[in-house]
Amino acid sequence: MRGALHRLAGARVSSEVDDWSPLLFEDDPTPGDPEEVDTLAHQLKWVAQRLEAQTMALERIHSRVGEPAWSGMAAEVFAGRVLTVGERHRTAASQHRAGAAVAARWSHDLGEAHAQSRTALHVAVEALSEIEHGHQLLAELSAAFLGSEAAAKALKRTFAMYQGLTPPPGVTVPTASQLAAVEREVHAAEQALDPVRRHIETAEQRLSEARAQGIRAQEQHARRERAFRDGMEAAATGAPRFEPSTRGEFVTALSKLTTADLSGGGGFLTALERLTTDQWAPLVTENPQLAWKALDDPPSPDEVAAWWGRVKDSPGLAALLKKAPELFGNLDGIPFGVRDACNRAVLKKALKDPASVYEAMDPRHRPGSLDEFVREAKALDEALRQAEAYKHRIPGGPENQVVQLVNFRARNGAVTAAVSLGDLDRATNVTVNVPGAGSTLAGGLAPHLRAGRDLARAAAKENPDATYAMVSWFGYRAPAPPEVGAPNRAMDGAKPLATFLDGLHAGRPGNAPERVNVTGHSYGSTTASYALKLTKYPTTTFTSHGSVGFATGTTAADLNVGEVFATESNDLIAGFGRTITYGSRTDPRDIDGVRVFPSVGVPGTRDVTGHDLHPEVGEGKDARPDSDKVGYLSPRSAAQRGTMEIIANGRPK
């Protein structure tokens, strides 16, 4: 595509006119061949029509992939490849049509420029010829006039010399009538010069106008040629590039993937087992949505960890991580440092080229608009920047003072993320904080991280022997306030939270954290209560803050947790959140086996004043705890102290 357009942009041929000097040009001022340009324009249009026909054929093929004809991961990859190629063909067809239109317009403009410059040249040649002939005639007439004038002067001298005298022999004295006749001849000769002079002046004026027209034609040609080149460059910009070198690799990988499907495994794990890292790379290159879709039903963290153990030293692993960072950054069971690097690579791309990341996401899960995705990505980046600025305050020394982005994807129309303050690959005491209703990256991640930082510092003072990591898990679409009465968002968030918690163990074989704690605020505690029924590995403690309730009938024994704690202040919002469920949820403080600790009335602490988790004033680096409002995890609050003691020692004092 680009080669054809650029050849067309450079289509300038020698002029059929050799001498442009009459217009004072060394070469053709309007070079190019309109017929050649028109021929190339028709060729581009023909290519566009062929590409459009191929696009329609690919669409028909794509419509036939799926149940009952062909299903499975190989079918998805093949369908993705067909869709990608079809989109490239459609883009190329559109660009060829645009190029054809630009070329046709240039052919017309070039023809007009040719007509103007050649008309000007014709006029200039004629004018120069007339000027040349005029000067020749003027020279002849001037000679005749000068001869007549000289003869008349001689006769006048003779007449004057012998007036009234007898001339000597041999001298003829003209008569007065003869003198008058001679003067008339001189006058006639002089008058004959004027029309010749006027004719020469007229020809010179026409020559000047012709040369001016030539300059105008040249300038118009230059302007329209620039417009043509710009138009062709615009048509070529973003032209799809096909990489023939990867086609063989793609076919080989697809063949193995098909074999995996037919062997009965058919799932993502089977594909991971059957394909080498080198074979995975072309698949995700050809089908960018494959990585995002694979996260919908991933293998268990244990299975992922086992796969990782087999491939971690593979020479092709680095290339695979680079090709599909969105997959491996969110796959539970992979080391968290690797996940952090992958997710930061995706975030960097999202900030630089948000449209490409947004379009590659699974349409079922990405946000409703690109603007929303950009807003959330920028908020995540800003929260990370702020955390990097205060990471030196994370307890545990330089090795643990890291900020890790261990989740970054889209789920149910929301951009989700999980950020750890502290090294999840080595911390001995890990806490996962789950936010409540209305939580978004733009609307709560930064203060949530600061709450985790303050909680970790307080816990480290209580038990300095542990190494802490605090995770702000914004990994689900939190409900809007009208959705709080329904369990849908909590049930949807339960599975990814459960696999994340199991990944804390599976991703660290032989080096699992000694303690894993979960805290949930408001609706986040509801989500966590569902998740803790699904985990394989037990969680040490689970603490709810101002909970809108656990599903009625839930007991502490139903949760895969060592001990369950709950606290609540005079929290009208939490109470209302339970009331609107019409009995389908229960206050965790009323559940057998749940230990309750106070949010008010603890000596040496501040009473929690409402439903907020960590109220702040100011923004960005100027944000600080609100001095008038006290949240559940505000510094020195009664609930923060009790939570800190649970995290550090297993129970409040």
Image (spheres, rainbow, N blue to C red):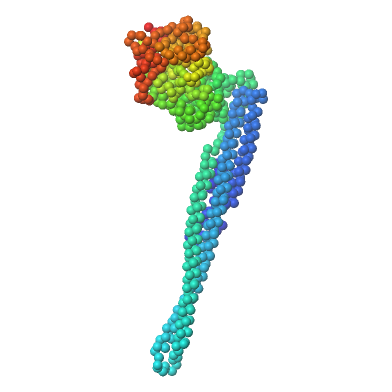
Q: In this view of the protein, which residue sits in the foreground, 307 or 630?
A: 630
Q: Using residue 583 as the reference point, say whether residue 567 is left or right of it.
A: left
Q: In this view of the protein, which residue sits in the foreground, 450 or 525?
A: 525
- At 48% from the left and 79% from the top, the residue drawn is 188
Q: Position of residue 67 (x, y in %)?
A: 65, 24
Where's the C terminus, which quadrant? top left
Q: In this view of the protein, which residue sits in the foreground, 533 or 330?
A: 533
- At 34% from the left and 11% from the top, the residue drawn is 605
Indicate whether 73 appears above or below 545: below
- At 50% from the left and 31% from the top, the residue drawn is 355
Q: Which image quadrant is residue 648 in?
A: top left
- At 47% from the left and 82% from the top, the residue drawn is 184
Indicate whether 182 appears above or below 353: below
Q: How many marks?
A: 0
Q: Using residue 9 as the reference point, say whether residue 55 is left or right of it.
A: right
Indicate whether 402 appears above or below 464: below
Q: Position of residue 630 (x, y in %)?
A: 37, 16
Q: Position of residue 163 (x, y in %)?
A: 40, 91
Q: Residue furthest top?
A: 592
Q: Residue furthest left?
A: 604
Where's the N terminus, which quadrant? top right
Q: Quick check: can you spot residue 232?
A: yes
